[in-house]
């Protein structure tokens, strides 16, 4: 079946612009994660949704970052007033349930470059 | 919190065996993951260990020692396509799956 998809795959933004990154998880998956991955680093947790509920947003770097999943499926990560340090790959992952030890299925990521 | 250490880079020869180590510190252990990530692509699941010992899956095996806070990923009969980053990751001790990833070990397989 279809995997996790993300759009756009690449985004170039001018400093100060707002951006919106979309994630379509695998259908029926309860859990959805957003990660930020800088070059040469591992993914860093940003936020977690269980269905439509955002249970953890402890990894969001600042109040410029906002995520939502209003109907418990598609999710959007919004970054307001982008800064150069926001340049990274933003990965979305989903898993079938909300249990510890569940495999996470990752999307291809959105590569954001802020100029 | 969680802390994970793994080498940043390794090089190995096609056809050989390579072992990628990972040490971790966690306040509550809930297993350990290994993911593979090719350059510019998404991480993909390789293994999940909860109990001590070696688990084998074809050319890839993963080992865990909970008492030592140590795991390794063993890749046999290396192929050029195994050139990738290998990410060690541990779930947190909460009620869901927040996962902390290591920096990743970039493996280069050479002819």
Image: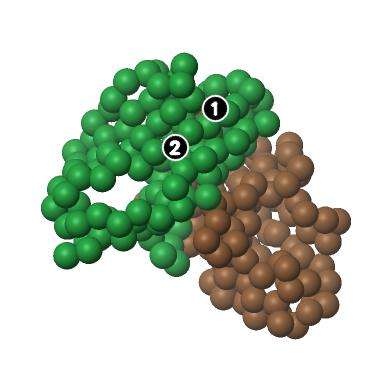
Chain colours: A brown, B green
Give coordinates of residue A61: x percent, y percent: 77, 54
Give coordinates of residue B39: x percent, y percent: 41, 65
From this viewpoint, is residue A70 visible? no
* Mark 2 lies on residue: B22
Give coordinates of residue B36: x percent, y percent: 38, 50
The residue positioned 60% from the left and 45% from the top of the image is A32
The residue positioned 55% from the left and 64% from the top of the image is A39
The one nearer the camera, B86 or A68, is B86
* Mark 1 lies on residue: A100
Going by the image, does A67 lie left or right of A113? right
The one nearer the camera, A43 or A91, is A43
The one nearer the camera, B7 or B42, is B7
The residue positioned 69% from the left and 46% from the top of the image is A47
| Residue lying furthest right | A63
From this viewpoint, is residue A43 visible? yes
Going by the image, does B28 lie left or right of B16? right
Going by the image, does B74 lie left or right of B66? left
Q: Distance between the Cα atoms at labels 1 and 2?
A: 20 Å
């Amino acid at each position: 079946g279809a995997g996790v998809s993300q759009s756009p795959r690449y985004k170039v933004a001018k400093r100060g612009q707002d951006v919106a990154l979309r994630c379509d998880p695998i259908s029926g998956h309860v859990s959805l994660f957003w990660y930020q991955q800088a070059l040469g680093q591992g993914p860093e947790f940003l936020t977690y949704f269980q269905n439509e509920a955002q249970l953890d947003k402890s990894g969001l770097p600042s109040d410029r970052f906002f995520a939502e999943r209003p109907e418990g499926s598609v999710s959007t990560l919004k970054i307001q007033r982008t800064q150069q340090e926001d340049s990274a790959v933003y990965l979305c992952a989903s898993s079938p349930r909300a249990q510890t030890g569940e495999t996470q299925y990752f999307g291809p990521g959105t590569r954001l470059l802020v100029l | 919190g969680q802390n994970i250490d793994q080498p940043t880079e390794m090089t190995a020869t096609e056809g050989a065996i390579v072992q990628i180590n990972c040490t971790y510190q966690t306040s509550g252990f809930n297993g350990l993951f290994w993911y593979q990530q090719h350059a510019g692509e998404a991480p993909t699941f390789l293994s999940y260990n909860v109990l001590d010992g070696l688990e084998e899956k074809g050319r890839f095996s993963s080992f865990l020692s909970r008492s030592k806070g140590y795991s390794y990923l063993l890749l046999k009969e290396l192929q050029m396509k195994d050139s990738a980053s290998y990410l060690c990751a541990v779930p947190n001790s909460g009620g869901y799956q927040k996962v902390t990833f290591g920096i990743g070990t970039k493996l280069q397989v050479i002819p």
